[in-house]
Image (cartoon, rainbow, N blue to C red):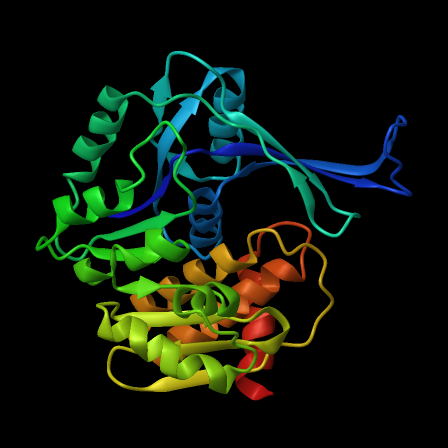
Amino acid sequence: MICTVTFNPSLDYIVSVEDFKLGLTNRTSSELMLPGGKGINVSTVLMNLGIENTALGFMAGFVGDEIVRKLREMGVKSDFIKIPEGVSRINLKLKSIDGTEINGMGPKISNDKVQELMEKLDTLKEGDVLFLAGSIPSSMPDDMYEKIMARLDGKGVMIVVDATRDLLVNVLKYHPFLVKPNNHELGEIFGVELKTRQDVIPYGKKLQEKGARNVLISMAGEGAVLVAEDGQVFEKPAPKGILVNGVGAGDSMVAGFMAGWMEKHNYEYAFHMGISAGSASAFSENLATKEEVQAVYKQVTEG
């Protein structure tokens, strides 16, 4: 079983506005509505790569219903817990203004609903994969990732964590299979500035010393680095292409890496699949399709 968790999913309203002006009525020149949230992005790319998985988390109100409907339309299986009050969030993303976003709050999640999610996760067993990605809503305990990983500790579940700062550092003792900070997030943890692929390698190893099994570091235009559990280190510059929409590129990298690992149990192949999926999503309006990933993979391995 492969599951992703999105505590606070969204309906992303992605718009382009030519010549945006504050204080005036602006009109969109293009618009797109997609289900969003880091776990949902991972689920979508895994499904695009032919890997069955289930998106878990919480949803509420008419927006929650639309998120589930859109996922079903895309072929993504979900098993969200319905929150009786409030509404799932709508996130406005202004594409033409340097990644400016206005994100909603989402519903308040009660302790009994958190417990319901925990019971769903209790069914995971050895060899299953769980993706934990993104921030934790203010209504939930801020050590939620730790609680989940402590509960699953010793069961042989491969857990992937894509989170920042303390959220990430505090779960390393549970030996996540994969963590994916970017170079800025990794630098923040250790109080240093990391610019080049060579810069990040020793700090990736430091995360391993703290308990991470594999450390995948994304570096936008600089490429990526994998510090693997078996001692190997892989690095690649960023594939060549035109950035169209960077939303979900990091999530796509995580999905591509795990898809590659599950297919061949080879770290180099998994790393190449991760870079390919991340870049393919960045070069596309939507999250990467299998064909788009394969096209970039060819460039990564032949270039």
Residue furthest to the left = 154
Q: Residue 270 at what x, y percent from top left?
A: 39, 73
**99 with respect to 299 (left or right):** right
295, 78: nearer the viewer: 78
Vertical relation: 146 (above or below) 242: above
Q: In this view, does 182 lie above or below 117?
A: below
Residue occupying image coordinates x 42% and y 25%: 59
In x, y percent, where is residue 139? Answer: 37, 27
Q: In this view, does 23 lie to the left or right of 245?
A: right
**Residue drawn at x 60%, y 71% as measured from the top left:** 295
Please indicate, yes or no, whether residue 174 appears anywhere in the rendered image: yes
Looking at the rendering, which quadrant does residue 115 occupy?
Answer: top left
Tally of numbered tags: 0
Residue farthest to the top, as pictured: 85
Q: At which x and y percent is residue 95?
A: 74, 46
Q: In this view, does 60 lie above or below 181?
A: above
Q: Which of 243 and 140 is in front in this view?
A: 140
Q: Residue at x 48, y 15 (%)?
A: 61
* Quarter of the image with the C terminus in it: bottom right
Instruction: Report the residue at 52% width, 32% height from top.
Output: 10
Q: In which quarter of the image is residue 118?
A: top left
Q: Where is residue 97 in the image (x, y as percent from the top left)?
A: 78, 48
